[in-house]
Image (spheres, rainbow, N blue to C red):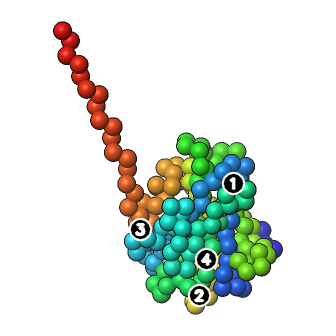
Amino acid sequence: MTAMTPGSNIPLPVARVTVDVTAPVRLDVSGLLLTADGKVRSDDDFIFYNQATGPGVTYRSGGGAAPDAIVVDTAAVPPGIEKIVVTASPDAEGQTFQGIEPTATIRNADDNSVLATFTPPQLGTETALVIVEVYLRNGAWKARAVGQGYANGLAGIATDFGVSVEEPAPAPAPAQTPVA
């Protein structure tokens, strides 16, 4: 097993890997399938609890008893997808990563053996992280430790990678009652 540091990478010796992310609080974990320009092809390339499957990528809920995870089958990833970004954000509204050290564990999806772990250092006001990426380089799949934080939550990450994020509609103004 390899303990990764920010920016480090490892070759993936297997075609199917699971990336699970643990922390002392409940996390939302998601994956984005990216093309060479670093963007999704469409919102269908954003894999999370409400859209659990995409080409070669699956979201797996831990159900609260185990960590949520993204499973990548590199053999089933479509041509043109060069990177799968795994993200994490605290489930609680407004919660930051201050004092919470999430750990990503990259596993062989077939036998659950650990290939590598990564805990991003020195987190603070971040409300979402790009924690790990699984990427294609010169015909071989690798994993990279990232740990890039966002202060504007999962919506900030999704928007940066080209996902359309619908903002909630503003609440209607309260009706004015005439004063008699």
Q: Amino acid at mark 4?
A: Val
Q: Could you say whether the residue bearing mark 1 is in a helix, strand or loop?
A: loop
Check residue 64 in the rendering and tell me which mark sits there, or answer none: 1
Q: Could you say whether the residue bearing mark 2 is in a helix, strand or loop?
A: helix
Please name whichever residue, 149 or 105, is drawn nearer the observer in this view of the structure: 105
Locate the N terminus and report the quarter of the image it occupies. Answer: bottom right
**First in sequence: mark 3 or mark 2?**
3
Task: Say which residue label 2 marks.
Answer: 75
**First in sequence: mark 1 or mark 2?**
1
Q: Residues within 10 Å of mark 4 (few under 14, many from 20)?
A: many
**Mark 3 → mark 2, Cα distance in angstroms:** 22 Å
What residue do we see at 71% from left, 77% from top?
109
Task: Say which residue label 3 marks.
Answer: 43
Residue 119 vertical placement versus 116 (above, below)? above
Q: Extreme top residue here?
A: 180
4 or 1: mark nearer the eye: 1
**Mark 3 → mark 1, Cα distance in angstroms:** 26 Å
Task: Say which residue label 4 marks.
Answer: 72
Q: Amino acid at mark 2?
A: Ala
**First in sequence: mark 4 or mark 1?**
1
**First in sequence: mark 3 or mark 1?**
3
Q: Residues within 10 Å of mark 1 (few under 14, many from 20)?
A: few
